[in-house]
Amino acid sequence: GAGVSQSPSNKVTEKGKDVELRCDPISGHTALYWYRQSLGQGLEFLIYFQGNSAPDKSGLPSDRFSAERTGGSVSTLTIQRTQQEDSAVYLCASSPSPSGAETQYFGPGTRLLVL
Amino acid sequence: KQEVTQIPAALSVPEGENLVLNCSFTDSAIYNLQWFRQDPGKGLTSLLLIQSSQREQTSGRLNASLDKSSGRSTLYIAASQPGDSATYLCAVRPGDYKLSFGAGTTVTVRA
C-alpha cells in the first residue's frame, strides 16, 4: 500500500516568507508526527497529533511554527517569517496508534532551504 | 532529558565484513528502541524494533541487542554488502510517543 507522502520534496524560499509543508499519512493511521533534521544534528520532535485529541506542540521551536491536521488525515506544517536557521529536512511520520508496540512510518521529507 | 549517542559516527569496511554499530542512552526507562536506515535524500526505514522486555531482535542479516539496564544497544549486520551503505539511526522511546534519536552512524561498504 501507499506509504507516507510529503510535498513539496524540496522548497527554496527567501528569508521572511511563509512556507507550508504537507504530509499525507498512511490511510487509517491515527497518530501523526512531525520531526526536523538539521544539518549535523539528529532528528528532533516537533509536534504530535492523535485522533481528535489536542496536539502536543511541545517540540515547536518558536511561535512562528504551527501545524494542523484536517479530518484526522492530512497535516500541514506552516512556518511564518522563515529564518535561515529554519533550513532543514522536515520529516513526517504516522503510526496506527500511539501504543509502544507500533513503529512510526516515515515519509521522504521536505528539504527546506531559506536564503 | 534522554540523550542518545551513536558510535562511531562513520564506518568504512570492505564487502563481506561484519558491521557493529553502537547506541547508548542515558535514561534506562524506555518503552522500546528502534534502529532505522536512512539513504541520502530519503526518509527513514525501520529495520528493527526491540520492546523494553526483549533482549534482541533478528531480521535476516540484521541482529539488534538491547541491554536496558546499561543503556546500550548494538546493531550487527552480517556479511556486509555495498547496498548496506547508508546512515543508521538509533531511536529510543520513553514512556510517551516522542522518539529521541542519535546522530547516526554513516556506513560505507566498499566493493
Image: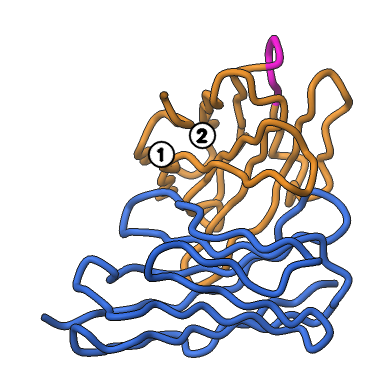
Chain colours: A orange, B blue
Q: Residues within 10 Å of mark 1 (few under 14, many from 20)?
A: some
The residue positioned 55% from the left and 31% from the top of the image is A18
Callouts 1 and 2 close, C-beta under 8 Å: yes
Q: Chain of mark 2?
A: A
* A74 or A106, nearer to the observer: A106
Instruction: Quickly name the residue at label 1.
Output: A13
Quadrant, the N terminus of chain A = top left
Please say if B32 is above or below A76.
Answer: below
The residue positioned 84% from the left and 18% from the top of the image is A52
Q: Is residue A101 magenta?
A: no
In-image side of A45 versus A7 (left or right) = right
Dominant secondary structure (helix, strand or loop) of the stretch shown in magenta: loop
The label on residue B100 is none
- Identify residue type, mark 2: Lys
Q: Could you say whether the residue bearing mark 1 is in a helix, strand or loop?
A: strand
Please say if B7 is above or below A22.
Answer: below
Q: Residues within 10 Å of mark 2 (few under 14, many from 20)?
A: few
Q: Position of residue A15 (x, y in %)?
A: 49, 44
In-image side of A93 versus A50 (left or right) = left
Q: Position of residue A36 (x, y in %)?
A: 58, 52
Residue B37 falls in image quadrant? bottom left
- Identify residue type, mark 1: Thr
The residue positioned 55% from the left and 85% from the top of the image is B22
Instruction: Quickly name the residue at label 2.
Output: A17
Q: Position of residue B85 (x, y in %)?
A: 28, 71
Q: Chain of mark 1?
A: A
Residue range highlighted in magenta: A68-72
Q: Could you say whether the residue bearing mark 2 is in a helix, strand or loop?
A: loop
